[in-house]
Image (tube, rainbow, N blue to C red):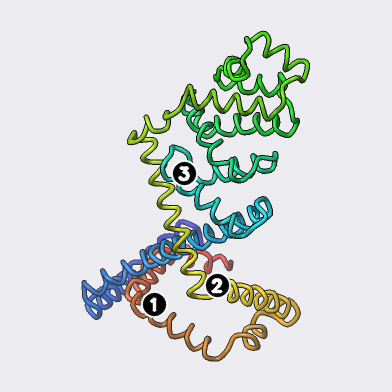
Amino acid sequence: MKVADLLVTISANSQGLRKELNAVKRNIKSAFGAESIKLSEQVASKFKWIAAGAAALGIASVKMNADMEMTTRAFEVLTGSSDRAKDHLAQLERFAATTPFEFPGLVEASKKLQAYGFQTEAVIPIMEAIGNAAMAVGLGQEGIDRITLALGQMNAKGKVSAEEMRQLAETGLPAWELLAKGIGVSVPEAMDKARKSAISAKDGISALLMGLNSRFNGMMDKVSGEIPQSFSNMQDSVKSIMRTVGASITEAFDLKTKMKNAADWMSEFATLAKSSGIREAFDQMVPDSLKTAIVGISAAIVGVAVPAFALLAVNVIAATWPLLAIGVAFGT
């Protein structure tokens, strides 16, 4: 049979089939009703997005709480105490909620300062001065990172050096001027002293922070209420709420224990599946009560979505019938 003749035959046969399929669709719509069909289609198309959205929110909250717990452990090492770590993080959280800077960035800055030898109690006052200075030169979180790094390296070296002063000057801050004024000398004299390693880190950092406070004090307050700061504060508040929600979910459902048990169970399931197959692993490791629940939930969901699935099946058959017929005719 020629291809042209075959296509004519298929077309003729398809017409009869399409009439039957259209009749089936009419019967489905008549049996379930227009409202049921509409509801079914909504369930079939949107249920997964509702479930995914709710799950994503819960997972994100739990994840943020878990990250906070890891951060707390890190600060326990830095501060030497669980209580001090929690108090310090709470202070950083409040600081983030009332400044243009966000909590994760402040956490990293605090880690850096403490790693370079600053005491925990000094972090917030230093961050206040650095935050005002960074806001003054318009650098935001980047400014905090760069100023923090320079001061931290200076503290670690135990002296003021030209390298860290250059880093501060590159942010746009009048670093040499502030240092010179703070130690009571001229700028050239301050540069000469720094070249000779004659300014201790303690004296130099104190002079710089005093200068920053004197020159830029209140800069963060001046932008209070502006859209960028309001947006930043909203983000910090939302994240704080989510961490609290995540902690509540974790505690209420004992997620740590259950997730460990789940991880152990999945590892055992994977091992059994590899050695004996999925069916055997399912039969051995999934309790009968859970199997029944899975079937029940699936049946409920599918039951509501049956009309939509039925119409979808009819449409698929109608669309693919010519291709199937050609395949059969050519023996494929």
- Residue under label 2: 255
**Amino acid beneath label 3:** Ala
Image quarter hosting the C terminus: bottom right
Marked residue nearer the N-terminal end (3 or 2): 3
At 52% from the left edge and 86% from the top edge, which residue is drawn? 290
Q: Position of residue 195 (x, y in %)?
A: 76, 15
Residue 13, quarter of picture: bottom left
Q: Position of residue 113 (x, y in %)?
A: 64, 39
Q: Residues within 10 Å of mark 3 (few under 14, many from 20)?
A: many
> Observer-nearest residue: 290 or 158?
158
Furthest toward the right, the residue is 196
**Amino acid beneath label 2:** Leu
Residue contact at pointers 1 and 2, CB within 8 angstroms: no
Name the side, left or right, on which 125 lies relative to 157.
left
The residue mark sitting in front, 1 or 3, is 3
Q: CA distance from mark 1 to mark 3?
A: 44 Å
Seen in the picture, residue 64 relative to 110 is either above or below; the reply is below
> Observer-nearest residue: 29 or 62?
62
> Observer-nearest residue: 23 or 70?
70
- Residue under label 3: 96
Name the side, left or right, on which 63 lies relative to 15.
right
Q: Secondary structure at mark 1?
A: helix
**Amino acid beneath label 1:** Ile
At 74% from the left edge and 30% from the top edge, which residue is drawn? 158
- Residue under label 1: 301
Seen in the picture, residue 146 relative to 241 is either above or below; the reply is above
Q: Which mark is residue 57?
A: none
